[in-house]
Amino acid sequence: MRPTRRGQAVLIAGTVLLAGGWWLRYPLAALIGAAGLGALAVALLTVRRRPPVEVTRTISPAQVERGRPATAVLTVRPAGPEVEIRDVVAGQVHVVRTGDTGEYPLPTGVRGRHPVGPLEVGREDPLGLARGRHRTGSATTLVVYPRQLPARAGGGPSRRTPPGPATDDLRRGAAEPRGIREYEPGDEVRRMHWRATAHTGRLMVRDLGDPRQARLTVLLDTRAGVLAAGDFEEAVDLAASLLGAAGRAGLPARLVTADGREPAGHFLEVLAGVRQGGAGTLAARGGGRLVLITGEPRAPAALGRAFDSVVVLALGRGAGAEQALRVWNEAHR
């Protein structure tokens, strides 16, 4: 609750008249001042009560790709006199005056999970001396996913590879070793390679594969400073496009961040909240094809040893997700 500008003027004038009339012994002035202050007090008590309406908000759609339109629709029940409704979306304040329904666009230019609300219904007394706000309904969340641009699935060998080191990445037979790698929890003891273990001093196993399966690993370079903020958003769009294409084609695929972690959950949910941070060297384990999305022109040598093929999609300096995908799609026709 707070006085409006008119109410503030009444407060000042009433205080001056009451004090001056009492001090100078002008009872009429004091009476007028007291009446004004009394009217303001009644106005404040009036707006303290909750308006006899309920406001609901519907977001359509509640989950949207970056840059796509989304709208909030407000419904007032019972419909009647116009009320002021205030909503806060991702830090932006929207004020709508309506007695029935109203709507406004939501900001979708920034990827992430954006809090929406709660709603506040404004009430003003008939004389316009005071205004109050009352919360109604509950807060919700607008989820802005990265864009998914047209992309071809790229787990198997390409007819022509994009720039970057690349070889045939089809995994070999289940009984045929692809190579030797360091032991990981869960590996079978019968796959242990004792000679390599003795030579390196670390537990080593034979890396076996399935000839019917090709695996795609998308390594998103989340290290701080490697990509500018705008280029990082393009990198996230590129990762979402490749993973979405792999999923639609039934190709096993996974997302890995710069520190080698494989975040749990659907890739769109993960990418909606991924942020830049940290430093160090890129890391990832596994076989098949690796697609490195970064701002640097080359992949570390260790990645080339861990995967059958490595493709680097470098962004920045005018190259965005659409340009990278044009090269990728051409290579996988």
Image (spheres, grey):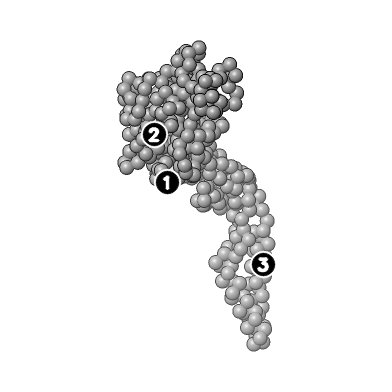
User: Depth-wise, is mark 1 or mark 2 nearer the camera?
Assistant: 2
Of pointers 1 and 3, the one earlier in the residue sequence: 3
Position of 313 with respect to 21 (left or right) is left
Instruction: Residue under label 3, please give it.
Output: 41
Report the amino acid beneath label 2: Ala
Q: Position of residue 248 (x, y in %)?
A: 46, 22
Query: Could you tell me how far apart the alpha carbons at marks 1 and 2 are, in whole angstroms?
Result: 16 Å
Task: Examine the rendered structure and indicate whether residue 113 appears above or below residue 35.
Answer: above
Residue drawn at x 54%, y 28% is 201
Could you tell me if residue 224 is visible in this image?
A: yes
The quarter of the image holding the N terminus is bottom right
Marks 3 and 2, how far apart in space?
71 Å
Q: Quadrant of residue 12 in the image?
A: bottom right
Residue type, numbered disc 3: Ala
Taking the image as shown, residue 240 lies to the left or right of residue 82, namely left
Frontmost residue, 180 versus 24 = 180
Left or right: 129 as drawn, with respect to 297: right
SS assignment at label 2: loop
Viewer-proximal residue among 167 and 325:
167
* In front: label 1 or label 3: 1
Secondary-structure class at tag 3: helix
Q: Quadrant of residue 31?
A: bottom right
Q: Which mark sits nearer the N-terminus, 3 or 2?
A: 3
The percent position of residue 39, horizontal first and vertical second, equals 65, 68
- Mark 3 neighbour class, 10 Å CA radius: few under 14, some 14 to 19, many 20 or more: some
Precedes in sequence: disc 1 or disc 2? 1
Q: Residue at x 42, y 41 (%)?
A: 232
